[in-house]
Image (cartoon, rainbow, N blue to C red):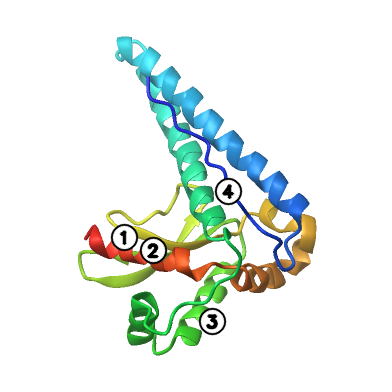
Amino acid sequence: MYKYEEQKFVILELKGMSKKSIEEHLKLYSGYVKHTNLIFEKIEELAKDSEKNMYVLGELQRRFSFEFDGMRNHEYYFKSLEGGAKALADNSAFKKMVAEQFGSFDGWLSMFKAIAAMRGIGWAILYYDPHVKKLVHGWVEEQHLGHLNGLQYVFGIDMWEHSYVFDYQPSGKKQYIEDFISNINWEVIEQNFAKAVKNS
């Protein structure tokens, strides 16, 4: 049976985000990978008699989507912090599209931060819609509720409290958003965008 592999990330010292906080957050990610595989294995086992186990299978599928998306969301998140903060190149295709669609890169970033700062837990995500060739914002409740069908992931921020309370306390949510953005390796986001456009 196929098993999902836990990825390893090389994350340098970050502004405002402590090593201990990142270590604890990575443990949470590890749990998502573990439970994705455990549920996947259980579904395969129970599917041998799907009629008998249909109710259990249905609930496991719901749980699988939570664990799987928790795994994948965090992989994008930690990948964007690898290699240290790096700015977008002047000829960045992503930066150009953002400016064309939202007026300016800074204007878009201000809008993205406002979405991230909403009350509640979840993820602020920027997608690329290959059907209309536009960037689209989304808010994902928990890990899996609200993902936009058929869109490609470009950039996102974890707004569950576990991602920032260790360093910022609940009242420091906005500072966490600012520091997270300042730590981004935008070359990774450029790669995400290029891949999304290529796959469209």
Could you say which is closer to the camera, residue 73 or residue 119?
A: 73
Say if 75 sits above or below 155 in the image.
Answer: above
Report the disc number at residue 22. none
Which percent across, then down, holds residue 188? 46, 63
Instruction: Tell me how far mark 2 sits from mark 1, CA to CA.
Output: 6 Å
Q: Is residue 163 above or below residue 185?
A: above
> Residue tagged by mark 1?
195
Q: Is residue 189 left or right of residue 170?
A: left
Return the residue at label 2.
191
Quadrant the N terminus occupies: top left
The residue at 42%/85% (across/down) is 90
Q: Decide which of tag 1 and tag 3 comes sooner along the chain.
A: 3
Q: How dense is the environment of label 1, judged by Cα within 10 Å: few (below 14), some, or many (20 and up)?
A: some
Which residue bears the numbered disc 4? 9
For the residue labelled by badge 1, is the local secondary structure a helix, a strand or a loop?
A: helix
- Image quadrant where residue 55 sits: top left
For residue 190, side relative to residue 180 (left or right): left
Residue 165 horizontal/vertical position (percent): 75, 57
Q: Quadrant of the C terminus?
A: bottom left
Q: Which disc number belongs to residue 110?
A: 3
Depth check, front residue: 183 or 34 = 183
x 64%, y 44%: residue = 26
Crowd around label 4: few <14 · some 14–19 · many ≥20 (10 Å): some
Tell me which amino acid carries mark 2.
Gln
